[in-house]
Image (cartoon, rainbow, N blue to C red):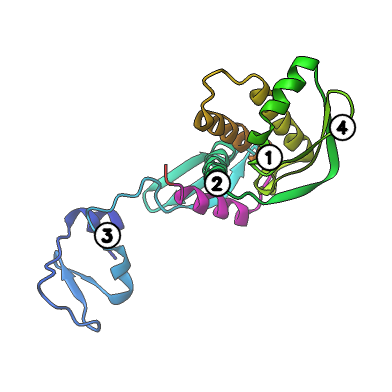
Amino acid sequence: KLDKKEVKEQVKLDFDTPIDGGEELVINNDLISDNEEQYIVHEDIEERIPIMWPIGQVHGTYIICQNESGMYIMDQHAAKERVNYEIVREKMKERKHESMQMLVPLTLEFSNNEYLILKENLNILTDMGFIIEEFGVNSIIIKAHPIWLQSSIWVHRGDIEDVIKEMIDMVIKREKKFDLDRFYDHISATIACKMSIKANTSITMDEMKSLIDELRECKN
């Protein structure tokens, strides 16, 4: 059986010559049967993250993977953070955001100046899917948040509240030349980190495999 890398480097197929499905390919004097044709990879296709399989976890932090080329060590938090960033950033681009009711509404109080700034820019948050109402003097109550804030099995209620507070803080401290894309990038990175698997967290083999598959599908 030929090694995948060996076939990729050595083989140049003659696409002008028809090959019957039932015949065996003869390449470099080696035989490749029908079920081995999947290893013939077009030279123009480059995999940024190779196909690999998890074999275990170390210290609840690193996933050990392997394939025919060798062994790989993956930081599970960094990997999930990359996946989450792309998910959240794509959600940010949507014009319509679905909201999710909070089991316990979040009440926040501000100084006079902070409250005035927040009221003037409240549309930044409501456009993202937040449902916010005034609640007493210089206070607001947040009854719902964008559904993508809780799109990870590793996210915790406290993390969501921290992210919401940071988002509001960014709105209040917005510069005169407010860059919405930069705001979305910063928020996406913050949310991605909060939503990701924490260190010293044991996950199953199926969850490891799922994470690897998700990472391979990332655009960047």
Name the kind of residue labelled 2 in the image: Ile
Residue 202 in the image, given as x and y percentages of width and height:
68, 44
Name the kind of residue labelled 4 in the image: Phe
Q: CA distance from mark 2 to mark 3?
A: 29 Å
Residue 23 in the image, given as x and y percentages of width and height:
21, 81
Q: Earlier in the sequence, mark 4 or mark 2?
A: 2
Side (left or right) of 205 relative to 46: right
The majority secondary structure of the magenta stretch comes to: helix
Q: CA distance from mark 4 to mark 3?
A: 61 Å
The N terminus - image quarter = bottom left
Q: Residues within 10 Å of mark 4 (few under 14, many from 20)?
A: few
Q: CA distance from mark 1 to mark 2?
A: 20 Å
Residue shown at the point (32%, 67%) measured from the top left: 38
Residue ID for mark 4: 135
Residue ID for mark 3: 41
Q: CA distance from mark 4 to mark 1?
A: 16 Å
